[in-house]
Amino acid sequence: MGQTFRKKYFGTKDFYKKTLMVALPIMIQNGITNFVGLLDNIMVGQTGTEQMSGIAIVNQFFFVFNLAVFGAVAGAGIYSAQFYGKEDHEGVRYSFRFKLYICVGITALGILVLSLFGDNLIQMFLKGDDKGLSIEDALMYGKRYMKIMLLGLLPFTIEQAYSGTLRECGQTVVSMKAGIAAIVVNLILNYVLIFGKFGAPCLGVEGAAIATVVSRYVQVAVVIFWTHRHSKEMPFIVGAYKSLRIPASLAGKIIMKGLPLLVNEVLWSAGITMMNQCYSLRGLDAVAAINISSTINNLFNVAFVALGDAIAIVVGQQLGAGEFEEAKDTDRKLIVFSGLLCVGLGILLFTLAPIFPTFYNTTDEVKQLAVSFMRVAAIFIPVWGLTHAIYFTLRSGGKTFVTFLFDSVYMWCVVYTVAYLLSRKTSISVIPMYFCVQAVDIIKVIIGSVLVKKGIWINNIVS
């Protein structure tokens, strides 16, 4: 009995080795990115509150843009993974071309919107306050930062098209190396250009923007150079630019699969923002504490986020190859692995939570609230890990409309509704409110588990 249980829910050493070969580079890259992002914000924050505020506002727009890109290429990514599993390199090539088209289109739209309406968008976030800060200066710094950052949108989107296709073809290390190279360049240039070191001019926020843009060009250059130099390993790139043709029927299918993912990413990010707004009604202490908690949580979340990508890639390839039973077995074991890993991460975060707020220059009340937020988050990390694994399971089989209902619709209709009612119709304090809102995701896990068990995701969309 015990042996049958282990065989059903736990894999062999080779199974986990194969999984980690896909997931570990993604974990490393995301972990370094989140850690360096923390250091980056600290450096910018040292230049002044108005500078930091202007950049923070503009980065919210770029956050929505980035998620739109992720969602847009994800639809083609489902096909890339399944085409690769089928060993249909021409199909992967078509999917890659589609990504290039959609990336250029979103970049053009993003530049147009932010160029025409950027000032008005920034001003929407600038409210009067009692702290003597200059709204005019924050607007000026935001405009300067955004003007330079627009130059980095195209290399970012093209890199996503290349790196996504490489990952879907089982090559994750190159993207990790390119990401690390970009991070190193970004950190060095930040230090030199923000503060005017080694004879360079002191550029402040403009220096931060220049550093980010240069690092993005470095990242995309590394990925493009490697891909074209290793065409035998990545045959999809051979002749990729000889013709930009995509079969109309395939393009239509990708659009049908990808549109829900694009809408989902945008709505999900907006939902997170509105949930945080609900918490902010309990005071500025809550706002500061949730920011500290979220920053630390992101470092702990990289593990299950990477495992979600691994599920999409490995299971997607098996579905594309028609190996349905193998895909079902792999998926079940990876979901269990993700859940158990998150239990360990939750225990670690719960134990270490009091340490992290000590690195921040803030009040004792904020630090205590941050510890409480992190400990509540630690309790629910296994829930987040399971929902993430279930989401990518459903997506691997092309059930993008189901994932849209599972993710964004559930977020707005259930999770946000609970947060809205608790914040405005009750006097409950912020920590119990946060706990109740996170607990709603337990229902989501139950619904998702039923969908996975029924096997509605077991689907070959490239046969």
Image: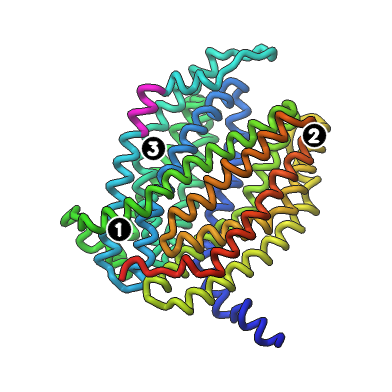
Residue position for label 2: 429
Residue position for label 3: 152
Instruction: Please identify the quadrant where the N terminus is shown.
Output: bottom right
Q: Give the range drawn in magenta.
A: 110-117
Q: Which amino acid does label 2 sit on?
A: Ser
Query: Sequence order check: which comes first, mark 1 or mark 2?
Result: 1
Q: Residue at x 66, y 34 (%)?
A: 420
Instruction: Please identify the quadrant where the C terminus is shown.
Output: bottom left
Whether pointer 3 and pointer 2 mark residues with C-beta atoms closer than 8 Å, the reply is no
> Does residue 112 belong to the magenta stretch?
yes
Question: Which mark lies nearer to you, 3 or 2?
Answer: 2
Query: Sequence order check: which comes first, mark 3 or mark 1?
Result: 1
Q: Is residue 287 visible?
A: no
Q: Is residue 281 left or right of residue 194?
A: right
Q: Position of residue 462 (x, y in %)?
A: 32, 67
Q: In which quarter of the image is residue 149?
A: top left
Of the pair 249 and 128, the residue shown nearer to us: 249
Q: Position of residue 361 (x, y in %)?
A: 75, 31
Q: Where is residue 439 in the image (x, y as percent from the top left)?
A: 71, 49
Residue position for label 1: 95
Asked if 110 appears above or below 446 in the picture, the reply is above
Q: Which amino acid does label 3 sit on?
A: Gly
